[in-house]
Amino acid sequence: MVDGHGFTDIEINKIIRIKDWFTSSEGNKMIDTNRKDFYTFITQHDIRRNTNFCKTFPELEEFYHKCGKI
Protein backbone atom coordinates (compact mmCIF):
# COMPACT_ATOMS: atom_id res chain seq x y z
CA MET A 1 0.00 0.00 0.00
CA VAL A 2 2.94 2.34 0.59
CA ASP A 3 4.02 2.04 -3.06
CA GLY A 4 0.45 2.71 -4.25
CA HIS A 5 0.37 6.29 -2.94
CA GLY A 6 -2.93 5.70 -1.17
CA PHE A 7 -4.47 3.38 -3.76
CA THR A 8 -5.25 -0.24 -3.03
CA ASP A 9 -3.84 -3.08 -5.12
CA ILE A 10 -7.32 -3.68 -6.57
CA GLU A 11 -7.59 -0.05 -7.74
CA ILE A 12 -4.10 -0.12 -9.26
CA ASN A 13 -4.83 -3.37 -11.11
CA LYS A 14 -8.10 -1.92 -12.43
CA ILE A 15 -6.29 1.12 -13.87
CA ILE A 16 -3.61 -1.11 -15.41
CA ARG A 17 -6.33 -3.20 -17.14
CA ILE A 18 -7.99 -0.03 -18.47
CA LYS A 19 -4.65 1.27 -19.79
CA ASP A 20 -3.91 -2.08 -21.43
CA TRP A 21 -7.33 -2.11 -23.10
CA PHE A 22 -6.90 1.44 -24.44
CA THR A 23 -3.49 0.65 -25.90
CA SER A 24 -4.58 -2.65 -27.47
CA SER A 25 -5.79 -3.02 -31.05
CA GLU A 26 -9.19 -4.02 -29.65
CA GLY A 27 -9.45 -0.63 -27.93
CA ASN A 28 -8.51 1.19 -31.13
CA LYS A 29 -11.17 -0.69 -33.12
CA MET A 30 -13.78 0.24 -30.52
CA ILE A 31 -12.76 3.91 -30.61
CA ASP A 32 -13.07 3.96 -34.41
CA THR A 33 -16.47 2.29 -34.25
CA ASN A 34 -17.70 4.74 -31.62
CA ARG A 35 -16.46 7.71 -33.64
CA LYS A 36 -18.23 6.46 -36.78
CA ASP A 37 -21.42 6.00 -34.76
CA PHE A 38 -21.04 9.49 -33.27
CA TYR A 39 -20.72 11.03 -36.74
CA THR A 40 -23.73 9.09 -38.04
CA PHE A 41 -25.85 10.01 -35.03
CA ILE A 42 -25.01 13.72 -35.17
CA THR A 43 -25.55 13.87 -38.94
CA GLN A 44 -28.97 12.22 -38.65
CA HIS A 45 -29.89 14.41 -35.68
CA ASP A 46 -29.06 17.54 -37.68
CA ILE A 47 -31.19 16.35 -40.61
CA ARG A 48 -34.18 15.30 -38.52
CA ARG A 49 -34.20 18.24 -36.10
CA ASN A 50 -33.01 20.89 -38.57
CA THR A 51 -30.02 21.74 -36.38
CA ASN A 52 -26.35 22.36 -37.12
CA PHE A 53 -23.85 20.69 -34.81
CA CYS A 54 -20.85 22.60 -36.19
CA LYS A 55 -22.49 25.99 -35.71
CA THR A 56 -23.64 25.06 -32.22
CA PHE A 57 -20.30 23.58 -31.17
CA PRO A 58 -17.59 25.20 -33.33
CA GLU A 59 -14.89 23.92 -30.98
CA LEU A 60 -15.86 20.34 -31.94
CA GLU A 61 -16.12 20.88 -35.69
CA GLU A 62 -12.64 19.49 -36.42
CA PHE A 63 -13.35 16.39 -34.32
CA TYR A 64 -16.73 15.91 -36.02
CA HIS A 65 -15.19 15.96 -39.49
CA LYS A 66 -12.35 13.67 -38.33
CA CYS A 67 -14.96 11.15 -37.18
CA GLY A 68 -16.63 11.36 -40.60
CA LYS A 69 -13.41 10.37 -42.37
CA ILE A 70 -12.94 7.10 -40.46
Image (cartoon, rainbow, N blue to C red):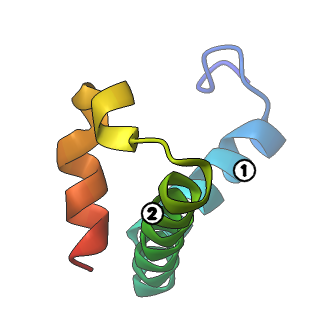
Residue at 72 percent of width and 50 percent of height: 14
Q: Which residue in the structure is indicated by mark 1?
A: 14
Q: Name above or below for residue 24 compared with residue 48.
A: below
Q: Nearer the viewer, residue 47 or 26?
A: 47
Q: Secondary structure at mark 1?
A: helix
Mark 1 Cα within 10 Å, few/some/many (few <14, many 20+)?
Answer: few
Q: Nearer the viewer, residue 22 or 33?
A: 33
Q: Secondary structure at mark 2?
A: helix
Q: Nearer the viewer, residue 50 or 68?
A: 50
Q: Looking at the rendering, which quadrant does residue 54 occupy? A: top left
Image x and y of residue 23, in percent:
39, 68
Report whether 53 appears left or right of 68: right
Q: Looking at the rendering, which quadrant does residue 7 occupy? A: top right
Report whether 14 appears left or right of 57: right
Tell me the kind of residue under disc 2.
Thr
Q: Could you tell me which quadrant the C terminus lies in? A: bottom left
Image x and y of residue 55, in percent:
29, 31
Label disc, if present, on residue 52 of the rendered structure = none
The answer for how far apart the CA atoms under marks 2 and 1 are is: 35 Å
Mark 2 Cα within 10 Å, few/some/many (few <14, many 20+)?
Answer: some
Image x and y of residue 67, in percent:
31, 65
Tell me the kind of residue under disc 1.
Lys
Label disc, if present, on residue 43 of the rendered structure = 2
Report whether 8 appears left or right of 67: right
Image x and y of residue 38, in percent:
50, 62
Residue at 21 percent of width and 62 percent of height: 66
Work out whether mark 2 precedes mark 1 in sequence or the reverse, and give the earlier one.
Answer: 1
Q: Name above or below for residue 27 compared with residue 25.
A: above
Q: Looking at the rendering, which quadrant does residue 24 occupy? A: bottom left
Residue at 22 percent of width and 59 percent of height: 65
Residue at 63 percent of width and 46 percent of height: 15
